[in-house]
Image (tube, rainbow, N blue to C red):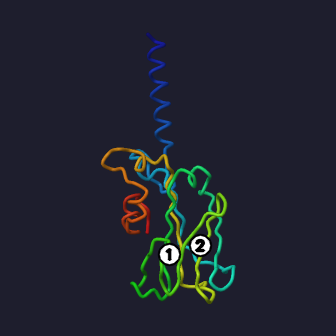
Amino acid sequence: MKAKSSNLYLLIAFLMLVLAGCKGKDGDDGLDGLNATVYYSEWFTPSAWSGNAGDWYFGVNAPDLTADIVENGVILAYVSLNGDLYESNAVRPLPAYAVGANWSFLIPEYKTIEFTSDMISMPSTTGNLFRFIAIPGNTIALKSKSLNSITENELKNMPYKDVCKFFNIPE
């Protein structure tokens, strides 16, 4: 009888440790399954652009963009451009056309993201902000058949503010 009680207490202690250790990059407890494993960058501006007229890019070290996330998850990228006529401080999902150019992103290798522009002249290094959100394929919000599930296309078509709200990401 004493051995059964000890095993029960050990099991409870183990479960408490496991549950206490579930933290996502965004600080949530991970128990709802929506945002425990969602990664996001801070807003950043390029220090320099590489390339030439019509083919500009800059790369960013992105350690969260692992092979598993790139191959099985969803990567969303956003831009807020200085001089955007659409709306002051507008946040556009990439790819987008704004300020007379196409803007996009690509993953040239794991753990790196590049943002691109086809402007004729070099894009500014001030006032243009970029950000990415990486959602692993094992995130319950993507895999579940419950009411909370969402498809990759729905995420890509969702306004930036709604994505942030859905995954509890600070804007």
Q: Residue at x 58, y 79 (%)?
A: 117
Residue 28 to residue 89: above or below: above
Residue 54 appears left or right of 4: right
The residue tagged 1 is: 79
User: Amino acid under label 1?
Assistant: Val
**Most extreme residue toward the right, as rendered?**
51
User: Amino acid under label 2?
Assistant: Phe
Residue 66 to residue 169: above or below: above
**Sequence-first disc among 2 and 1:** 1
Instruction: Look at the image and tell me in which quarter the C terminus lies.
Output: bottom left
Residue 157 to residue 55: above or below: above
Q: Does the residue at mark 2 contact the one at mark 1 (Cβ under 8 Å)?
A: yes
Q: Position of residue 64 (x, y in %)?
A: 59, 57
Question: How would you rate the neighbour count of disc 1 (Cα within 10 Å): few for under 14, some for 14-19, many for 20 or more?
Answer: many
Label 2, secondary structure: give it.
Answer: strand
Q: Position of residue 158 (x, y in %)?
A: 38, 65
Q: Position of residue 19 (x, y in %)?
A: 46, 39
Q: What's the CA distance linking mark 2 and mark 1?
A: 9 Å
